[in-house]
Amino acid sequence: MSSKLAIVEECLTPWERTTDLAEAFASVRHRLAEDIEWVEDPTWPGYGTYNSPDEILRYLRAQMDEVWESLHVTIDEVRDLGGERALTIVDATGVAKSGVETKLRIAHIWTIREGQVKRIEWYLDPERALEAAGEG
């Protein structure tokens, strides 16, 4: 496994061990570039782009406090896209604060540079992620 894929798996694995995304994210902060870009799918309610580990952590804490009762992530696929990029597909199951149960299949395109995560792009449709990555 390339060091790029090892970094991606290192960053995602804590998400499988907890239902608190902010806690999982904080545990891998050392892998995140200070100028990281976190770009959400524009179809996600209230989507945005966040430009530092602190901004992302605040956002995730707000999501856990305001939106989710619990959320669990399972890694389905990690794929090398060549160069600095990798693709992951995860299954997320959760219960919203409203009590609604949710199942999502989410893809991410990661950019890893000099051992740090520089960018994560989220896609609620893995096929769109594959197209964006030139794989579809």
Image (cartoon, rainbow, N blue to C red):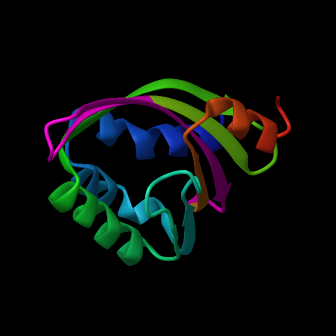
Tell me what residue is drawn at x 60 percent, y 38 percent: 5
Residue 80 as seen in the image, left or right of residue 67: right
Can residue 122 be seen by looking at this rendering?
Answer: yes
Rendered location of residue 11, percent (x, y)? 43, 46
Rendered location of residue 72, percent (x, y)? 27, 33
The residue furthest top is 76
**Is 76 located above or below residue 66 in the figure?**
above
Residues in magenta, as a range: 91-116
The answer to which of 32 and 15 lies nearer the viewer is: 15
Tell me what residue is drawn at x 77 percent, y 37 percent: 81
**In the image, residue 83 lies in the stretch drawn in magenta:** no
- Quarter of the rendering occupied by the C terminus: top right
Tell me what residue is drawn at x 47 percent, y 30 percent: 90
Tell me what residue is drawn at x 19 percent, y 60 percent: 66
**Is 35 located above or below residue 105 in the figure?**
below
**Is 51 located above or below residue 47 in the figure?**
below
Task: Report which quarter residue 80 is drawn in.
Answer: top right
The answer to which of 101 and 71 lies nearer the viewer is: 101
Task: Report which quarter residue 13 is drawn in.
Answer: top left
